[in-house]
Image: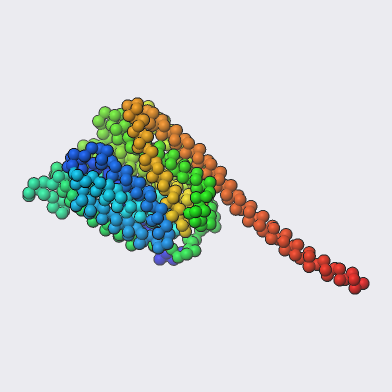
Amino acid sequence: MTENQRSSRWTVLAGAMIVQIILGTVYAFSVFVKPLETEFGWDRTTTQWAFSIALLTFAAVMIPAGRLQDKIGPRKVASIGGVLLGLSFLLGSFLVDETRPWSLYLTYGVIGGAGIGFAYVCPIAAAMKWFPDKKGLVTGLSVAGFGAGALFFAGPASTLLLPSGPGSEAMGLSQILLVALGITQGSGFGIGWKMFFILHGITSAVAVLLGATLLRNPEPGWQPPVSPTKRVQNRPHADSEWQDMLNTPLACMLWITFIFGATSGLMAIGQWKPLTSAIMNGKTFAPAWAGGFARFLEPVGILAIFNAIGRIFWGKVSDLIDRPRAMMIMFLFQGMAFMLLVNITSPAAVFIASAWVGLNFGGIFALFPSATADYFGTKNLGMNYGWIFTAYGVAGILGPVVGGVLFDATHAYVIAFVFAGILCFIAAGCSVVIWSLARSRDNHAMYGNEIAALQEIRHLQTIAESRAVPAAVNKECAT
C-alpha cells in the first residue's frame, strides 16, 4: 500500500468523524424544548412530536439514501444531507410560530431528519470499504462522533438559546464563538432561538459539506495488504443485493436482534436523568470549579461519553472474536446492568452504571453495520444497512413509549428496567442464533465449493473413461 493510499484511508475516516459529530447533535433535541415551550406556550407532547418525526424520517430515508450512495458515491449524497440539515434550521427560524407547530415538524422533523438520513450512512460505507481488515474498529470510530456530538453541543446550545440581552449587552461574535466552543458559559443571556437556528443551520451545512469532501470510495477490487500471520475472524461474503439479503434468515435475525437491543437501551436512556436524579437527591459529581465542563461529569454526560467509547471498544472487540460473539457478550452485560440498576443507591454506583450502560448501548451502532458488511458485502452496504437500520426506527417508537407507559402505570422505575434487562437477554439469545446461521452459511459455502470441485473431477473422469472404451473395443476387433 502506497503512502498516498494510506493517507487516503485515514483522511476518509477523518471526514467520516466530522460528518457524524454534526449529525449527532440530533440527540440534543431536549435543549430546544424549554425555549420553544416558553416562547409559544406549547406542551411537552407538541414539542416531542418533532423529535419523533425526525427519528422516523431519519430511519426511513436511510433506505433510498443508501441506494443512491451505492450508485453515485458518498461525497454527493453526504453533501445533500448537509444542505438539507442546514436548510431545516434556516427555514425553521422563519417559519416556526405559535400557531404553526406543524412548521417545526416539517422543518426539523422531515427536512432535518431527511438530511441526517442522507448523510449518516455515507461515512460508514466509505470507511468500511477502505478498511475491510478493520471493519468493526473503523465503524466504531466513524459512529463515535454521532454518539459524542450531542454531548459537546448541548451545553453551549443551552446558553446560546437563552433570550438575547438588552441593547449594549448583546453578545458579540467573539463571545458567541467562545460559548459555542464551550470555553465560557456566557453572561446570563444568549442570542435567542431564532438566531441560534440560523447559526446552527449555517454551521451544520458548512461542517457536513467539509467532511463530505473527504469521503470517497476506493478503486473497485482494492484491498489493503494483510499480514500472512493475521487471523481473519470475520470472513467476507459475496456482495448481495438488498432483495436477496432480505430473503435470508440471517438478515431477519439481525433486524430482530437490533430491535430488542435498541428498544431496551432507548427505554432506559429516555428515563436516565430522572432516575439518577432521584437516586442522588440533587447531588452532583462535578466540583464547583468545573464551570461549563461540569456537564461531562453528570450521569447523562458520563453515559454519552461512554456511548461514544463503546462504539470504538465493541467494534475492536468484534474484529477479534467476531460479531455475534461480541453481540452476545455485550447484551448479556447490558441485561445484568439493567437488573442491578433497581438496587443501586450510592453516587458511586450511579457513576459506574452510567458508564456501563453507555458503553454497551454504543456498541450496537458499531456491530450491526459491521455484521451487515460481513455477511452481505460492502458494495451495496448503503442500501443493505438502510434496511437493517429500520429496526432502529421501530425501537425509537417502542423504547420511549413502553418505558413511559410502564412508569406511568407503576410510578416506579423497577418494572421498566427489569423489562429492559429481559429484552437484552432475548437479544443475547438472538445473537447465538445469528452465530449459528452465520456458521452454517460459512460451512455451506466451504463444503459446497468442495462438493462442486469433486463433482467436476468425477465428471472429467467419466468423460475420460468414455473416450477410452471405444479405443479398447477397436483394438479387440483388430485382433
Residue lying at the far front in this picture: please name it: 99
Asked if 122 appears above or below 315 in the picture, the reply is below
Side of 291 relative to 314 (left or right): left
The quadrant in which residue 126 appears is bottom left
Residue lying at the far left in this picture: please name it: 168
* Of residues 182 and 411, the one drawn nearer to the viewer in this rendering: 411
Side of 460 relative to 277 (left or right): right
Asked if 253 appears above or below 418 in the picture, the reply is below
Q: Position of residue 102 (x, y in %)?
A: 25, 46
Q: Tell me which residue sits at (50%, 44%) in the image.
A: 253
Q: Position of residue 153 (x, y in %)?
A: 26, 47
Q: Position of residue 444 (x, y in %)?
A: 61, 50
Q: Tell me which residue sits at (78%, 65%) in the image.
A: 466
The figure's colour scheme reads rainbow
Please tell me how many numbered marks the rendered image carries: 0
Q: Position of residue 436 (x, y in %)?
A: 56, 43
Residue lying at the far bottom in this picture: please name it: 478
Asked if 115 appears above or below 462 in the picture, the reply is above
Residue 135 seen in render:
no
* Of residues 352 and 63, the one drawn nearer to the viewer in this rendering: 63
